[in-house]
């Protein structure tokens, strides 16, 4: 198929959030730590009424209704998530419930998991299916999202919750640029979930931050090499990318990610005029650069204009929701499409940096080749973010405790108030003695 890529995208996030400034006060940390230090304003969360299956069902059903797509037209459904409630049965198979009425049970694809990267792998699978001899002419859905929760402590404010649903098709407004893709994967214990009886990850925070930046280095370099090789670009750099969307654990990490892009451009062309003020960092080895705060700061300053022009519009959802793990980078894409009018996006290259701990990372890109305004007006991102309800940090903690206590529960009826959910939200009604889950919809 020609011009395979993103035809439409919708997002789901819970109706309730906790304010990060109030959380700073409540946690007794210095004012500004979460809001300025992490760059977060609000964090979405859910109680025991929602699980990974329900939030994915909400996202998919909402998408199909809003964009008027029929379940019979779907030939592939891929799910990227790291929120696991079953070691065997995939979330994808739960989503097949939504297909029942259409009679379409011939739907390929299954779950893909590696921290925040599963959604990217799912998207690649769907696009490559459509680009291959296996394609039968039908459309694909890619669902990526998570319930991101941390044990109480310094990682907790970097949680969040959200799911994206993407329609992949031919002649897409956002066509994936084959084969422009730079990938980096290695074995590292920075963030992982070895404790199967807990919903919380085991995290080496500082290592995860360095690993993210190392992955930026390698994936970006590999992407630029492909640009030079396949697109005939000379001295490829950030100048060849119009918009750059990052995986956002918290938005401050994205600021650092873009600064690192500038550092990489500097290493590739230190003699360039742009880098006149940072010549002193030529002597620093790449390995030593990771912990060098002076260097980091210098390149954050140097990349301010690029941040405003190329990345800032993609941070709307991340700042207001928090980390959505596999969904994060696509919430970034959805934010960009909502915040930047099509007239400005037309013909431009949008690159994405996806990072999943453990680790797996890719830089890849789309070309905006047809109108995206229908997406923006359909998903009404800003409006929906503003429709949410703020709750106190104490209430947020109560919800976290409830999730923790009832994780893996059997013969259980959730106690969360269904009236607090947005209309059209799927919710957990009951878990029976064989851990079978039943759902309703508001
Ligand atoms: N005002 C302004 N800034 C402040 C304040 C304040 N009052 N207090 C602290 N800060 C700054 C710090 O200087 C620091 O800035 P820097 O990053 O530029 O050095 C920043 O806020 C964070 O403060 P730390 O003390 O480093 O925070 P802490 O160690 O408590 O937690 C961490 C941060 C490690 C990221 C934690 O939230 C975590 O473990 N999160 C989960 C892992 C994660 O998200 N990793 C990212 C990539 S992997 C992934 O996506 C899951």
Image (tube, helix red, strand yellow):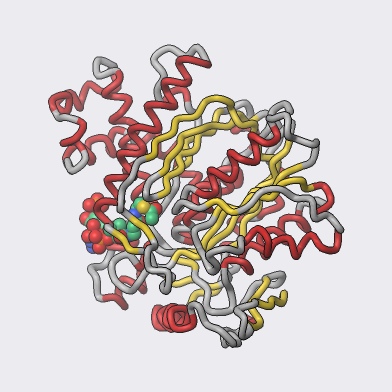
Q: Position of residue 17 (x, y in %)?
A: 49, 71
Residue 176 picture quarter: top right
Quarter of the image containing the C terminus?
A: bottom right
Q: Nearer the viewer, residue 183 or 327?
A: 183
Q: Indicate whether 440 appears above or below 372.
A: below
Q: Position of residue 251 (x, y in %)?
A: 39, 51
Ligand 1 in which quarter:
bottom left
Q: Which of 241 and 144 is in front in this view?
A: 144
Quarter of the image containing the N terminus?
A: top right
168 lies left or right of 364 = right
Q: Is residue 118 visible?
A: yes
Counting the numbered discs, the total is 0
Q: Where is residue 229 in the image (x, y as percent from the top left)?
A: 47, 15
Q: Which of 12 and 411 is in front in this view?
A: 411
Report the residue at 61% width, 55% height from top.
381
Q: Indicate whether 204 appears above or below 210.
A: below
Q: Position of residue 161 (x, y in %)?
A: 51, 64
Report the residue at 38% width, 50% height from top.
357
Report the residue at 40% width, 80% height from top.
397
Q: Is residue 392 visible?
A: no
Report the residue at 65% width, 75% height from top.
427
């Amino acid at each position: 198929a020609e011009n395979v890529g993103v035809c439409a995208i919708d997002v789901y996030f819970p109706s309730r959030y906790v304010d990060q400034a109030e959380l700073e006060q409540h946690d007794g940390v210095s004012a500004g730590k979460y809001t300025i230090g992490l760059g977060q304003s609000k964090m979405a969360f859910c109680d025991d009424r929602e699980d990974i299956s329900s939030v994915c069902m909400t996202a998919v059903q909402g998408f199909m209704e809003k964009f008027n797509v029929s379940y019979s037209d779907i030939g592939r459904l891929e799910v990227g998530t790291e929120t696991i409630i079953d070691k065997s049965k995939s979330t994808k198979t739960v989503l097949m419930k939504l297909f029942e009425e259409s009679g379409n049970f011939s739907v390929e694809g299954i779950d893909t998991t590696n921290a925040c990267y599963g959604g990217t792998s799912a998207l690649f699978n769907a696009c490559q299916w459509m680009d291959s001899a296996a394609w039968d002419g039908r459309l694909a859905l890619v669902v990526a999202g998570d319930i991101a929760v941390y044990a109480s402590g310094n990682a907790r404010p970097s949680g969040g919750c959200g799911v994206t649903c993407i329609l992949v098709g031919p002649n897409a407004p956002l066509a994936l640029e084959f084969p422009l893709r730079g990938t980096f994967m290695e074995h590292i214990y920075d963030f992982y979930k070895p404790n199967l009886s807990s919903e919380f990850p085991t995290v080496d925070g500082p290592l995860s931050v360095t690993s993210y930046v190392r992955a930026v280095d390698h994936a970006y370099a590999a992407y630029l090499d492909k640009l030079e090789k396949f697109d005939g670009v000379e001295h490829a750099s950030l100048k060849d990318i119009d918009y750059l969307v990052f995986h956002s654990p918290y938005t401050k990490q994205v600021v650092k990610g873009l600064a690192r892009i500038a550092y990489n451009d500097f290493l590739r062309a230190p003699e360039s005029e742009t880098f006149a003020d940072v010549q002193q960092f030529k002597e620093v080895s790449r390995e030593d650069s990771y912990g060098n705060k002076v260097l980091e700061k210098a390149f954050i300053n140097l990349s301010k204009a690029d941040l405003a022009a190329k990345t800032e519009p993609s941070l709307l959802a991340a700042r207001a929701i928090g980390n959505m793990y596999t969904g994060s980078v696509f919430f970034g894409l959805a934010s960009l499409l909502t915040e930047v009018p099509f007239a400005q996006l037309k013909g431009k290259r949008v690159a994405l940096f996806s990072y999943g701990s453990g680790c797996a990372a890719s830089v890849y890109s789309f070309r905006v080749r047809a109108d995206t305004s229908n997406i923006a007006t359909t998903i009404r991102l800003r409006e929906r973010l503003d429709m949410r309800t703020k709750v106190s940090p104490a209430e947020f903690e109560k919800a976290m405790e409830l999730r923790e206590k009832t994780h893996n529960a059997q013969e259980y009826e959730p106690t969360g108030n269904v009236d607090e959910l947005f209309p059209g939200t799927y919710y957990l009604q009951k878990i029976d003695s064989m851990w079978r889950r039943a759902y309703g919809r508001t």
